[in-house]
């Protein structure tokens, strides 16, 4: 095996595959990752935490043919010495011998593997160009800007600057190997304000980018965080009622994530999703089109290949309200008699899971202000609390806070309420979609309006 110093990660992965096959594996796949991260947080101008770290690891999954499919097992290590790799291989094969046979296990066909050929602009050198002192200054500048907005901003939960780079390689025994790099950086801030009755409120804002040049200024992050915090002060409860509910983009993306979860092959073949058996059926309003696209240049969920070595692609989950695809890896595809959608995800150890690339609800034509104008009375949700979502039945109940809508305008803050409905009905009752689609992560949504939900308050 080439030494860790002289070999690329792709070479290391390919060599471990070879060793696993030589030791008795019918098939094998290897993931190798390395990365560096930096993180600093400040509070009231003083550094609270400062971290700089590197990591490296390798994961191996072996498949041993049996009378009824394959026996599979996986192991991982951070020890790249020849002895460490030998232990990795031998351990995986020993575990495979005592695992159960699975007729659906196995790698994809060799013809299915591949990688996007173009530069996807996932890595930028400038992420680590800033000296440590300037990284700390970014965090301080964001916090200072938030504290300067209003005298009611009396404290801070901190400002932060984070940066990281990573490299991933993947290889398998069907002839695929690939490697790519990625980078990211972010600035965030969370000020604390005091209201007229002495109550305290906190909110946040952040900017996240692949390159340093893509970040918003620390000052704009701090000022936005302050405005978001101030609008929460002196919140009220409202009466229990049914009114239109408008979800801000930061909150709405959770609903789009729920569509992905409901369409995930793992949940579908287990019968643990309200989308089971709904392929080709109307599951949302006709205005709703949800896309998973792992090919967007510079996207936060972009990669040249998925967790199994299949090329990333664009898949429409829901088109004009109709469920078009389940999201599948090779295993769940076989379970359902379908093909993978290039949606495999994986850590270093374990079997592939199901993940998304850049998942988003396509934007509508209304500006957020225009979307609000048609609402005489309603709720604009800015925060959700709790995990009250049942993916089997679709029942949905979450603690919430936000801003009350009167005559198309945002008026006073609302807190200590619960919003409830059923996702099957909520998706069908999306009555307006904003034009403000912005990616601040791998899942994005514009502002959206849902009718027919219940607010539980006083």
Image (cartoon, rainbow, N blue to C red):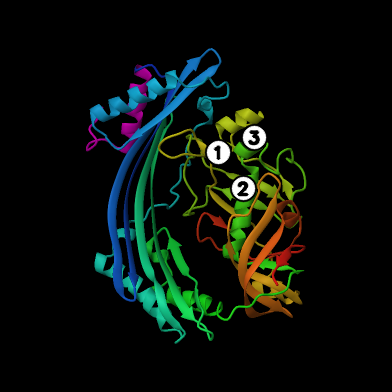
**Whole-percent x, y for residue 310 in the image:** 51, 35
Quadrant containing the C terminus is bottom right
The residue positioned 33% from the left and 70% from the top of the image is 42
Q: CA distance from mark 1 to mark 3?
A: 20 Å
> Which secondary structure, mark 2?
helix
Q: Earlier in the sequence, mark 1 or mark 3?
A: 3
Q: What residue did someone put label 2 on?
A: 260
In the image, taking residue 203 as reference, residue 431 lies left or right, namely: right
> Which secondary structure, mark 3?
loop
Q: What residue did someone put label 3 on?
A: 270
Q: Which one is in front, 116 or 58?
A: 58
> Which secondary structure, mark 1?
loop
Give the residues drawn in magenta, as a range: 1-22
The residue positioned 42% from the left and 70% from the top of the image is 189
In the image, taking residue 148 as reference, residue 335 lies left or right, namely: right
Residue 10 inside the magenta-drawn segment: yes
Residue 342: numbered disc:
1
Check whether the beta carbons of the residues at disc 3 and disc 2 lie within 8 A of each other. no
Q: Residues within 10 Å of mark 2 (few under 14, many from 20)?
A: many
Which numbered mark, 3 or 2, is in the foreground of this view? 3
């Amino acid at each position: 095996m080439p030494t860790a110093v002289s070999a690329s990660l792709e070479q290391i992965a390919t060599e471990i595959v070879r060793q696993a096959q030589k030791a008795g594996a019918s098939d094998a796949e290897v993931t190798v990752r390395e990365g560096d991260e930096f993180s600093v947080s400040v509070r009231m101008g003083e550094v609270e935490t400062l971290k700089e770290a590197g990591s490296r690891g390798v994961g191996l999954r072996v498949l041993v043919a049996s009378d009824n499919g394959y026996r599979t097992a996986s192991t991982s290590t951070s020890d790249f010495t020849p002895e460490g790799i030998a232990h990795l291989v031998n351990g995986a094969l020993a575990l495979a011998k005592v695992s159960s046979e699975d007729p659906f296990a196995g790698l994809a066909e060799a013809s299915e593997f591949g990688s996007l050929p173009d530069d996807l602009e996932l890595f930028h050198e400038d992420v680590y160009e800033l000296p440590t002192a300037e990284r700390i200054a970014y965090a301080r500048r964001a916090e200072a800007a938030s504290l300067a907005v209003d005298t009611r901003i009396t404290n801070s939960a901190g400002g932060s600057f984070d940066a990281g780079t990573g490299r991933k390689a993947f290889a398998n025994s069907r002839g695929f190997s690939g490697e790519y790099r990625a980078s990211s950086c972010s600035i965030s801030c969370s000020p604390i304000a005091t209201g007229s009755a002495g109550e305290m409120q906190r909110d946040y804002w952040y900017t996240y980018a692949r390159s340093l040049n893509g970040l918003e200024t620390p000052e704009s992050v701090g000022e936005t965080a302050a405005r978001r915090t101030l609008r929460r002060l002196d919140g009220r409860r409202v009466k229990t009622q049914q009114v239109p509910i408008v979800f801000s983009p930061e909150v709405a993306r959770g609903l789009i994530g729920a569509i992905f979860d409901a369409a995930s092959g793992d949940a579908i073949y287990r019968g643990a999703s309200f989308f089971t058996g709904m392929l080709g059926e109307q599951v949302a309003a006709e205005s709703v089109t949800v896309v998973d696209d792992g090919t967007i240049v510079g996207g936060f969920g972009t990669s040249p290949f998925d967790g199994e070595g299949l090329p990333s692609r664009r898949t429409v989950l829901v088109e004009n309200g109709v469920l078009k695809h389940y999201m599948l890896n090779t295993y769940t595809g076989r379970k359902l008699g379908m093909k993978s959608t290039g949606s495999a995800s994986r850590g270093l150890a374990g079997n592939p899971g199901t993940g998304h690339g850049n998942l988003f609800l396509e934007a509508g034509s209304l500006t957020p202000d225009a979307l609000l104008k048609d609402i005489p009375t309603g709720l604009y949700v800015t925060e959700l609390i709790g995990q009250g979502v049942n993916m089997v039945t679709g029942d949905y109940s979450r603690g919430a806070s936000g801003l009350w809508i009167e005559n198309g305008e945002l008026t006073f803050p609302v807190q200590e309420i619960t919003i409830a409905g059923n996702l099957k009905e909520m998706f069908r009752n999306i009555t307006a979609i904003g034009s403000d689609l912005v990616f601040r992560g791998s899942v994005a949504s514009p502002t959206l309006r849902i009718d027919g939900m219940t607010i539980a308050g006083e």
